[in-house]
């Protein structure tokens, strides 16, 4: 995948791949995975996403077997998980303050900035105009 374009996805997108109940824009989410499988893009997210997605799955009121299967699938998805370093953490803090968003939300934006990639999200908080960061609402991914 030498020519694959890096794309950052946040937890709001990953959840769609694991359980479609009450989720919108599933075709666009599936297109991301198909593009990854075709070698057009490579997917990135933060380790933080594992915790956020796990929490979201718990609140979907699925039975134990379905929840376990979804969590196992989370670890099988073709996503590169990144750790934050100190510089990224400091940048996330500044971005969170500047745009009045959570540190969690700012962290995904910072990863996209560091990778010089786009952030695809279904989180409206990310969908404000940002300098140096291209944010694509999931419904506009094609």
Image (tube, grey):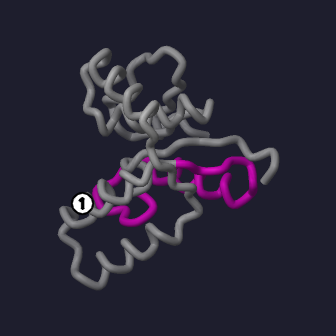
115 lies left or right of 1: left
Residue pointed to by mark 1 = 55
> Measured from the top left, where is residue 140 in percent x and y?
52, 34
Q: How many marks?
A: 1
Tell me, yes or no, whether the highlighted magenta stretch contains residue 58.
no
Above or below — where is 65 with respect to 84?
A: below
Q: Secondary structure at mark 1?
A: helix
Above or below — where is 29 with respect to 77?
A: above
Q: Residue at x 22, y 80 (%)?
A: 63
Q: Report the quarter where the C terminus lies.
A: top right
Q: Quadrant of residue 127?
A: top left
Residue reaching furthest to the right: 2
Mark 1 Cα shell of 10 Å, populated few (<14), some (14-19), many (≥20)? few
Above or below — where is 11 with respect to 56?
A: above
Q: Residue at x 37, y 59 (%)?
A: 50
Tell me, yes or no, whether the highlighted magenta stretch contains residue 30.
yes
Q: Residue at x 54, y 29 (%)?
A: 113
> Measured from the top left, where is residue 110 in percent x and y?
46, 31
Residue reaching furthest to the front: 86
127 lies left or right of 96: right
81 lies left or right of 19: right
Question: What are the residue bounds of the magenta stretch?
Answer: 16-44
Name the one closer to the observer, 21 or 122: 122
> Measured from the top left, where is residue 27 in percent x and y?
52, 52
> Measured from the top left, where is residue 97 in percent x and y?
27, 19
Q: Report the quarter where the N terminus lies.
A: bottom right
């Amino acid at each position: 995948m030498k020519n694959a374009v890096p794309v950052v996805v946040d937890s709001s997108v990953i959840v769609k791949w694991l359980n479609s109940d009450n989720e919108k824009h599933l075709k666009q989410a599936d297109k991301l995975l198909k593009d990854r499988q075709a070698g057009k893009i490579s997917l990135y997210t933060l380790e933080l996403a594992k915790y956020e997605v796990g929490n979201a799955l718990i609140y979907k009121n699925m039975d134990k077997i379905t929840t376990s299967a979804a969590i196992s699938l989370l670890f099988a998805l073709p996503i590169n998980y990144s750790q934050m370093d100190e510089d990224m953490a400091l940048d996330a803090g500044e971005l969170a303050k500047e745009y009045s968003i959570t540190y969690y939300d700012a962290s995904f934006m910072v990863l996209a900035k560091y990778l010089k990639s786009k952030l695809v999200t279904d989180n409206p908080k990310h969908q404000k105009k940002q300098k140096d960061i291209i944010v694509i609402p999931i419904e506009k991914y094609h």
